[in-house]
Image (cartoon, coloured by chain):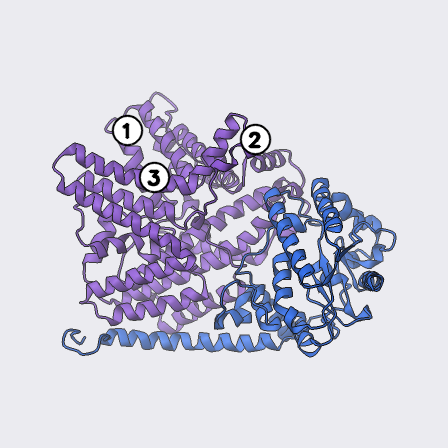
């Protein structure tokens, strides 16, 4: 070990330290290489976010309609059935805070954007927003070029596999090993093959479906409700200022799900929808949550998601609503 | 910055390189690097609260010096109380103030808008309960002449702000940690390797056990009204493994990280699910917190009257109630603490005239009943700990004891995750006399096999890590 007092350099390492550094280098190099191989493999998988991103790039000058929301909107809105150029940037568990970031982050790239389809589902207002380090922020950054982190981003924020190793490991196995992916994405990123839900397994038998157990979040949270409602109004104010027409929509739910809803949550959500309708001139409501006439059991993937047939019907309704606005 | 984050994966080697590169003879430079790194580590969360750490450190540093230099006992008491009032005051303001205001208003049946102006919109600084307890113990120990105060401000700032244990412990006694900042730290390859192994084990517990358990527990506890008795009991047991994996995993990473810098931190967990009694449990769970409350609450209450049953029971009751309250400002935590206290007192109550016939003294729970005892105790404690408020607690207990069938429980059972829990438990039980299962693995296994084991762990952590969750104890 060189005596630090006798050396001009501020830093010095002993032999043991250097040996250990080499040891670490040899040990960790394969880990780093393996990681980047996985990252490349993940980037090669044709996931819907990637298709959305490509579509956003190639059609940015033509897009007039943007769909935003959670998995209900993702499964329920197929831009292929809309007369105008549309994009559906909804995704599973996407909440209003992400919707807003996506809108603000893409609006300058979409000169023709006129309509926003915004989902306000049954319990949207009483579920907390996702935190700033939500894993999908990496996806938004990588594929949409949207920074939802609310801080300057750096190289690590673009590493897709690292953002959710569990999810992407599953995707890697599904795509490369089992080759079992049944997704059939159209040019808009909509999965036209997504029929394989709980209802198909039950052969759309209404008696079996009535006995089928499903998950529903009925929790009441007034604090979250107040916060989310204020946030929703902030979003609508922004859209009004940007001269956007907004179709606030609720998507169809199957009757067993409708019956299980917490009436207090429904009442509060509906009162907010009422306020929105009276307060914002640029907003129309498309409330299809309880539409059991147009949507039958065959239109559902499961209790709270439409299948592609249901999506076709719902998208046609969106189309008519947009036509009526002109 | 989370220990399980990519940022920490960059921060740690950079700090470590700088720290060892300045040479072990330059203690001041090493301590300065540690202090800067610690403040950077904490400041990334919220730099404004760095002022609070610095203020607490300075107040206790000068209070201790004043206690030592003052010959007058009443003056010494004044300095001691000033330090205690500051520490407890900060803790009260950030952690308990709104809770007490709410309860006070409820007591007098006030409407929320009548007292809303009195509540404060404050966020709880990360690690506040940990570092205030650590600094407070320093001044108390100086007052009690257990240790001499340090005159080296840099070392004291390092003692309070040492990043491996700053935000969630282990809560160190000044007599254990402070002298380590005065000593030269030699680079010991074996110790550093042990540190890395302990970090690996901690990451496995945090990212694979705790974060995966959180997935299931959060689903059930988000809407307990949708789940039957068995599902609620299952989720509550998993919550124990969540919090154990989370906190003991954090402690392992903290202790391992400290080893990389040549420091030794106290053991914080000792396989609590093998506890033979509630008292035994608290000697195995968050050991440094129990030690703190023993030293500064329990023993001062009982003083030397160990045989005075009433006094001892009061001491247990108060200590456990305070431990409950330490965890958070809610009635569920207070009930949690009191519940533990009542169980401890009942364990120590003699079954016959002979004092030593109590469950505690005899470890009377028969071996074959031990798993049932552990299961019941862990489930009950978990429900109290996890419930957000009294209403939720009531709802969960009502549903459990209504014996509602759990038809959806199948969807909650993740066999692979249960295998990992089994691996963790089996490894810890087999190596129960050691600090952690991977310790001194090089004595028994050759390098290629060892490396394969490490790579398997890294693979499992990458492949099966649950969704990233904050460390639970950060909120305390």
Task: Residue B88: give its label.
Answer: 3
Q: Residues within 10 Å of mark 2 (few under 14, many from 20)?
A: few
Total numbered circles: 3
Quadrant location of residue B109?
Answer: top right
Above or below B386: residue B267: below
Q: What element carries label 2?
A: loop
What chain is tagged by disc 2? B
Tag 2 or tag 1, which sits nearer the N-term?
Answer: 2
**Residue at image location 54% in from the left, 75% down from the top:** A38
Above or below B60: residue A176: below
Quadrant location of residue A47?
Answer: bottom right
**Residue at image location 55% in from the left, 70% down from the top:** A161
Q: Which chain is blue?
A: A
Q: Mark 1 points at which residue?
A: B302
User: Spatial distance from mark 2 to mark 3, Cα to Cα?
Assistant: 29 Å
Q: What color was chain B assigned in the picture?
A: purple
Q: Is mark 1 on a helix, strand or loop?
A: helix
Q: Do labels 1 and 2 share a chain?
A: yes
């Amino acid at each position: 070990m060189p005596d630090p007092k006798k050396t001009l350099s501020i830093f010095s390492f002993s032999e043991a330290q250097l040996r250990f550094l080499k040891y670490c280098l040899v040990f960790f190099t394969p880990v780093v290489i393996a990681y980047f191989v996985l990252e490349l493999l993940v980037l090669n998988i044709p996931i819907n976010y990637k298709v959305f991103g490509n579509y956003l790039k190639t059609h940015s000058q033509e897009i007039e309609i943007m769909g935003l929301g959670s998995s209900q909107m993702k499964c329920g809105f197929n831009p292929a059935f809309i007369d105008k150029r549309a994009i559906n940037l909804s995704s599973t568990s996407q909440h209003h805070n992400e919707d807003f970031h996506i809108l603000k982050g893409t609006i300058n790239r979409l000169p023709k954007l006129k309509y926003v389809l915004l989902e306000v589902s049954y319990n949207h207002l009483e579920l907390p927003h996702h935190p700033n380090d939500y894993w999908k922020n990496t996806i938004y950054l990588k594929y949409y070029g949207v920074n939802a982190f609310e801080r300057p981003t750096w190289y690590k924020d673009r590493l897709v596999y690292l953002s959710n190793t569990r999810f992407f490991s599953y995707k890697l196995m599904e795509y490369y090993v089992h080759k079992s992916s049944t997704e059939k994405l159209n040019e808009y990123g909509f999965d036209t093959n997504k029929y394989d839900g709980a209802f198909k397994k039950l052969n759309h038998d209404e008696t079996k479906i009535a006995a089928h157990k499903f998950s529903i979040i009925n929790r009441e949270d007034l604090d979250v409700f107040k916060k989310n409602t204020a946030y929703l109004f902030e979003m609508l104010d922004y859209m009004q200022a940007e001269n956007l027409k907004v179709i606030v929509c609720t998507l169809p739910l199957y009757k067993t799900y409708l019956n299980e809803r917490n009436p207090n949550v429904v009442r509060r959500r509906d009162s907010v929808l009422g306020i929105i309708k009276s307060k914002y001139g640029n907003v129309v409501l498309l409330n299809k949550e309880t539409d059991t006439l147009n949507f039958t059991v065959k239109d559902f993937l499961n209790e709270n998601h439409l299948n592609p047939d249901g999506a076709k019907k719902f998208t046609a309704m969106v189309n008519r609503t947009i036509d009526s606005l002109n | 910055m989370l220990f399980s984050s990519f940022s920490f994966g960059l921060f740690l080697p950079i700090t470590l390189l700088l720290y060892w590169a300045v040479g072990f003879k330059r203690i001041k430079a090493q301590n300065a690097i540690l202090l800067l790194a610690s403040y950077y580590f904490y400041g990334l969360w919220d730099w404004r609260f760095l002022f609070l750490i610095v203020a607490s450190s300075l107040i206790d540093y000068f209070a201790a010096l004043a206690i030592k230099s003052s010959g007058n006992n009443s003056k010494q008491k004044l300095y001691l109380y000033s330090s205690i009032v500051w520490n407890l005051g900060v803790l009260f303001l950030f952690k308990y103030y709104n809770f007490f205001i709410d309860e006070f208003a409820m007591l007098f049946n006030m409407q929320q808008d009548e007292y809303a102006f009195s509540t404060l919109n404050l966020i709880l600084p990360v690690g506040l309960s940990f570092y205030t307890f650590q600094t407070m113990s320093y001044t108390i120990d100086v007052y009690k002449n257990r240790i001499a105060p340090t005159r080296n401000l840099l070392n004291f700032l390092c003692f309070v702000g040492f990043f491996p244990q700053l935000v969630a412990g282990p809560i160190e006694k000044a007599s254990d940690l402070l002298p380590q900042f005065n000593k030269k730290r030699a680079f010991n390859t074996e110790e550093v390797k042990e540190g890395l192994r302990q970090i690996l084990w901690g990451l496995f517990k945090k990212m694979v056990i705790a974060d995966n358990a959180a997935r299931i527990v959060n689903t059930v506890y988000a809407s307990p009204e949708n789940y039957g008795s068995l599902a609620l009991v299952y989720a509550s047991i998993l919550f124990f493994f969540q919090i154990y994996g989370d906190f003991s995993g954090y402690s392992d990473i903290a202790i391992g990280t400290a080893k990389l810098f040549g420091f030794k931190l106290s053991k914080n967990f000792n396989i609590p699910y093998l506890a033979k009694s509630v008292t035994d449990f608290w000697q195995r769970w968050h050991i440094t917190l129990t030690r703190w409350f023993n030293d500064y609450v329990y023993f001062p209450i009982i003083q030397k009257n160990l045989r005075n049953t009433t006094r001892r029971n009061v001491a247990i009751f108060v200590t456990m109630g305070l431990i409950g309250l330490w965890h958070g400002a809610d009635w569920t935590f207070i009930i949690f603490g009191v519940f533990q206290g009542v169980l401890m007192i009942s364990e120590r109550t003699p079954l016959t005239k002979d004092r030593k016939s109590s469950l505690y003294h005899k470890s009377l729970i028969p071996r074959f009943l031990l798993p049932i005892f552990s299961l019941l105790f862990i489930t009950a404690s978990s429900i109290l700990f996890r419930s957000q408020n009294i209403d939720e607690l009531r709802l969960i207990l009502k549903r459990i004891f209504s014996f509602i069938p759990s038809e959806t429980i199948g969807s909650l059972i993740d066999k692979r995750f249960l295998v990992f829990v089994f691996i963790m438990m089996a490894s810890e039980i087999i190596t129960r006399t050691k600090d952690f299962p991977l310790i001194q693995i090089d004595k028994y296994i050759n390098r290629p096999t060892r490396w394969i084991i490490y790579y398997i762990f890294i693979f499992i952590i990458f492949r099966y890590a649950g969704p990233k969750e904050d460390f639970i104890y950060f909120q305390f």
